[in-house]
Image (cartoon, grey):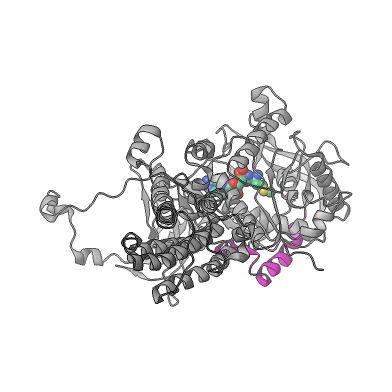
Amino acid sequence: MPGKETFYITTPIYYPSDNLHIGHAYCSTAADTMARFKKQQGFDTYFLTGTDEHGQKIERKAMEKGVTPQAYVDEIVRGIKELWKLMDVDYDDFIRTSDERHVKAVQKIFRKLYEQGDIYKGTYEGWYCTPCESFFTELQLKDGCCPDCGRPVEKTNEEAYFFRLSKYQDWLIDYIQTHPDFIQPKSRQNEMLNNFLRPGLQDLCVSRTSIKWGVPVDFDSAHTVYVWLDALTNYITALGYTSDDPSLYEKYWPADIHLVGKEIVRFHTIIWPIILHALGLELPKQVFGHGWLVLSGVKMSKSLGNVVDPVVLCNRYGSDAIRYFLMREMPFGSDGQFSYEALLTRMNADLANDLGNLVSRTVAMVQKSFDGVVPAPLEYTDGDRALIALANQTPDLVSLHMDGLQFSTALQDIWKLVGECNRYIDQNTPWVLARSEEGRERLRTVLYILCECIRMVAVLIQPTMPRTPARIFEQLGVTDENLTQWPSLHFGAMPAGGKTQKGETLFPRIDIKKELADIVPDAPKAPPKPAEAKPAALKAEKPAEECISIDEFDRVKLRVARVLTAERVEGSDKLLKLTLRLGPNDPERTVASGIAKFYAPQDLVGRQVVLVANLKPAKLRGIRSEGMILCASDADDQRLTLVTVAGDMEDGAYIR
Ligand code: MSP
């Protein structure tokens, strides 16, 4: 008998240099949700996560604390594992790059690549910051100094091993072009091809003599393996590749999905595939680069001090609510704004009002009218049939969107059913039906339909919210395990007669104002909403000379443009050089824009921006800049974000 189809999903392995924040939890929650979904669908799933423990940063932090790097990471890893437990991130394996099984496998991989000539010894030339013990390339320097501490750097060189990336460049371009699903979303694929591969790959320095906390090269002990080469291989070393028992590797490799944040897509779609190909191994089926959770427009990060602690959130609101928010709030692939207001608003609207009320109202009505026993339906009306049809379509829609990693859309599908159930209650007014004998007959059908739809909703939310379904099944009196599984997702699978139980409110309503003021006074707030427009009579204070006429405004041609390429401008830490596409008949434009401090070039490629298209060209650092892209920035230019259009618009469209 053939075995089950397998599904192997991974998160990046996290740096244990600090406690993880809600942005990290975002990636793990997505991977866990996907793994649970596939398991629910009958796949033999394997979900891997772990920690990326080597390197100078950890070495230094441990030294500051006066402990060994191993003791330092052990403590943090304990906390990370506790966090995943708290968030119900139910991995199958947790790999640590300091695990002996990993270290041994990395050494074998390095040796094999060396012996076959893909790794060779050379000299690493670059800039060295002695206090930081760090090497930097010319481009990484900030105004000629160390980008970390700002102190002067020295030109230096050290003996190092190099990996022949350049040899595989053409093969990789061809592979990406012939495997359109390999890099997703598509914009990331264009970015990799245009920004990195087509301009040409340089061989990669893959060893250091100055870093001791790393995997030693076993045939040249002065060297340790470059952290990314060490880290990327975790996806196969965890499965036992090169070990005495490679059975997991044989079963699960190639991975179905590597989920990674957008800033590390480059490592996963250039260095990693080349390593695999050089080893003669298959490539993962897909690398999906998701967006960031941002706070007030800026990526959450410890160094910026704008992090939100997932432990605090889960302890306060429950992990299901946090998981739901993370998966529902932003389309996977795009950046999304975190704010306490948004979280609490969603908890009240979607969880307390929509789902919670639906369950409590329905169970209360069954209790009151039928002694708590789910009644058998009698005859279905057209209205009943419409709701039943929606209930039967929803699992297919959810599957479709989950398979495309569109978590938010899949949840919207489920909440459409929840919403229709609530509307059905309002239309059928069960409290009126309960008053007459005839009405009570009809009420049997209405309440059965509601109970059955709620059961189906509970099955569908399991991957995202692992805890809530059990509470719903208990309230509905569902005791048969089969009725909690995916194959039971057809209306009518649940027999009547279940004994309902009034339970605790699933999601208590929160007084948002009070919560924000009393409990999280220092909570980062969402950016203030623009002030509401005042009635004309009240806003006449503006001096007339500051106003422009509509004709004057019409002279400014604002157009939607798409970024084709983006690169840093040598010698400037502010400017990026962009090429932009407008309409099919417009020539491409070059624009120099002062946004380099806020955007990495690779984050811009493929995005739509707003261009002042008829601005007189100007020369900036030798670049003829043909227009200006619009950004919003705060008063002291500490924060800046690109202006764009809310939906996908054709390139070149005029903004009026
Ligand atoms: N150690 C590397 C990965 C090596 S994989 C072979 C690393 N670690 S990390 O801890 O810095 O980041 C791990 C993951 O968390 C990345 O995918 C990163 O994008 C993600 N996130 C970190 N901050 C995030 C947000 N604010 N929002 C969403 N994801 C974010 O990179």
**What type of secondary structure mainly makes up the magenta span?**
helix
Q: Bounds of the magenta span?
A: 164-189
Look at the picture and state if 322 lies above or below 331. Answer: above
Question: Residue farthest to the left?
Answer: 537
Left or right of residue 374: residue 353: left
188 part of magenta stretch? yes
Left or right of residue 192: residue 248: right
Q: In the picture, which quadrant includes the N terminus?
A: bottom right
Which residue is at a point 80% across and 59% down the rendered structure image?
Answer: 251
Return the x and y of residue 375 as percentages of the image width and height.
47, 62
**In the depicted view, which residue is nearer to us: 284 or 427?**
427
Left or right of residue 71: residue 531: left
Return the x and y of residue 26 as percentages of the image width and height.
55, 48
Which residue is at a point 29% across and 64% down the rendered structure image?
Answer: 556
Q: In the picture, which quadrant includes the C terminus?
A: bottom left
Return the x and y of residue 365 as percentages of the image width and height.
40, 56
Look at the picture and state if 480 lies above or below 139. Answer: below
